[in-house]
Amino acid sequence: MAAAVMEGYNSAEGRCKKHCETIQGLCDTCDELVCVKCMMGHHNGHTFTDLEARVGEKMELLQGRVQEMRGRVPVLQQRVAELSIQDDKNQRDTEAVITSITQKGESIRNKLENIISNLIANAENQRKETARQLSGTKEVTEDLIARGTSFLENVDSRLKLGSNLEIIHLERECSKLLMKMSEDHLIHHIPSPRFVGGEESVEKLQAMVGDFYSDLASSLKLMSYVRIDATLTGCESDIFITKICRVSDTEAWIKGFKEDKIKLFNKRGKLLKTLAIRPTCHDFSTTKSGSLLTVDPKLRWVQCLSSDNEPTTLVDFQEGQLPISIYVNKTTGNFLVGLVDSLKHSSSFLSTRLIKKFSYDGQELQTIQYQTKKSFFGRQSTSNIFTYPHRIAENEQTGDIAVINWTGDFTGELVVLNKDGEVIFRHSNTAEEDTFSPWDVAFDVLGNVVVSDRYSRNIQLFKASGRAKCVLHKCSFTPHAIEAFSDGKLWIGHSNGKVSIIQYME
């Protein structure tokens, strides 16, 4: 308002800037200083007040605003100081992380070089041992050839001159030579290198990466509040997001309900790529190289889609085993598959409901299906762990497995198991709680289990032990798909086709 009053006013001359006439008053309608020509011109019909009559009022307003400004300037100065402190802290934290990365990186490089040297030495030693075995077998074989050749050259002449006793002696000699020539040890296959210590080396690598990962994770902590960093549109507003699959810390594949395509978005909401998939695809996950592994219960297979979109079938399941969920461990390349014998969200003791682990090339490694319980009287009984393993996640550092286990059309539970398939804890609705209707699950960088609950519209966070639970975020729209990222962000797919990116670690 003060700017409007001063508009058109020449303070040096006390005249109207437009007409160069003496200021006569104040236009109440426009709150502007006016001269006579202004009153008769574009301010015609407005109400006016004598200038002197408004000076006292304006002075009072001015004094109040000056006083307010005096109070605000220190506040802003304090904020600038706080920002400087935050900037300094950010600089120190960044330098600390870079130092940790550099030190750990150098340590990993040195250990990798030692492991590679050992592997090469093992391979060379095995080659030498194999060569020694082959050389020995070759000498024995050549000796037998010489003996056999000599026998064949002399047998006819010995038969012509020999007696009955000589014939018997020749037959025995020939029989012994033939027996030696047919012995299995003469056919020596070159073995494939076993790389003695190879498994140990893999364990060492995982231990190194795990330590490095733990160091980085320890620099993160839960924030006292949740900040929504971005919102992007993944689907039409009437289609809910069923799956979010991380590709990198800035990109993820997104799929809408019953859509026959998936879309690759970056965190700014830019659509990078669209990929056609079968509408009967129930779930998918990405490998470290960026390939997609999909499960299709109708065709009963796990397929790999490479970067050139060429499908390769990794696993064909027999009838009665329908794959409905999948998770790829990007550290080991192994993948978990949830299997059912029916797409109904209920089961009996005769039902087949399980999870299988496979190697990166489709070799079966582990089956998780039953749990053993001991009754009050000491008797043991076996029961199915799962009813309908809708979604799976794995802690790539500890091997723990989290499963969204549907027990009905709108009810379910969270089941967390260790790497051996033993149940650590289960969570479902209790007498004190409302219905628990989970859709998706993820492990965050701190090892917490994060779950989306459709009934309460909450994102819930569990400690890996199951002893602590909290509401991480309350959503305005029903949350379905979730995916945790290593930078402390969580992508949440909602029922309105939107994806929220929240930050809850710092």
Image (cartoon, rainbow, N blue to C red):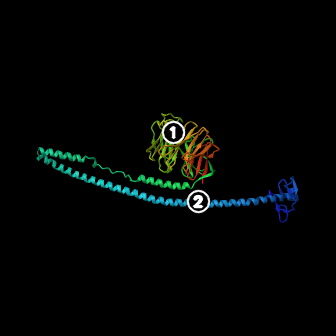
414 versus 19 height, above or below: above
> x and y percent of residue 349 in the render?
49, 34
Q: Secondary structure at mark 2?
A: helix
Residue at image location 72% in from the left, 59% down from the top: 75
Give, as a three-letter code, the residue at label 2: Asp
Q: Which mark is residue 290?
A: none
> Mark 2, residues whose alpha carbon is within 10 Å: few (<14), some, or many (≥20)?
few
The tally of labels here is: 2
Q: Specify whether 197 is left or right of 224.
A: left
Place residue 236 in its image quadrant.
Answer: top right
**Where, quadrant-wise, is the C terminus in this rendering?**
bottom right
**Where, quadrant-wise, is the N terminus in this rendering?**
bottom right
- In the image, 7 versus 470, the foreground residue is 470
Residue identifier under label 2: 93
Q: Specify whether 2 is left or right of 212.
A: right
Residue at image location 69% in from the left, 60% down from the top: 78
> Mark 1, residues whose alpha carbon is within 10 Å: few (<14), some, or many (≥20)?
many
Residue at image location 31% in from the left, 55% down from the top: 131
Residue identifier under label 1: 386
Whichever of labels 2 and 1 marks the residue nearer the N terminus, that label is 2
Place residue 71 in its image quadrant.
Answer: bottom right
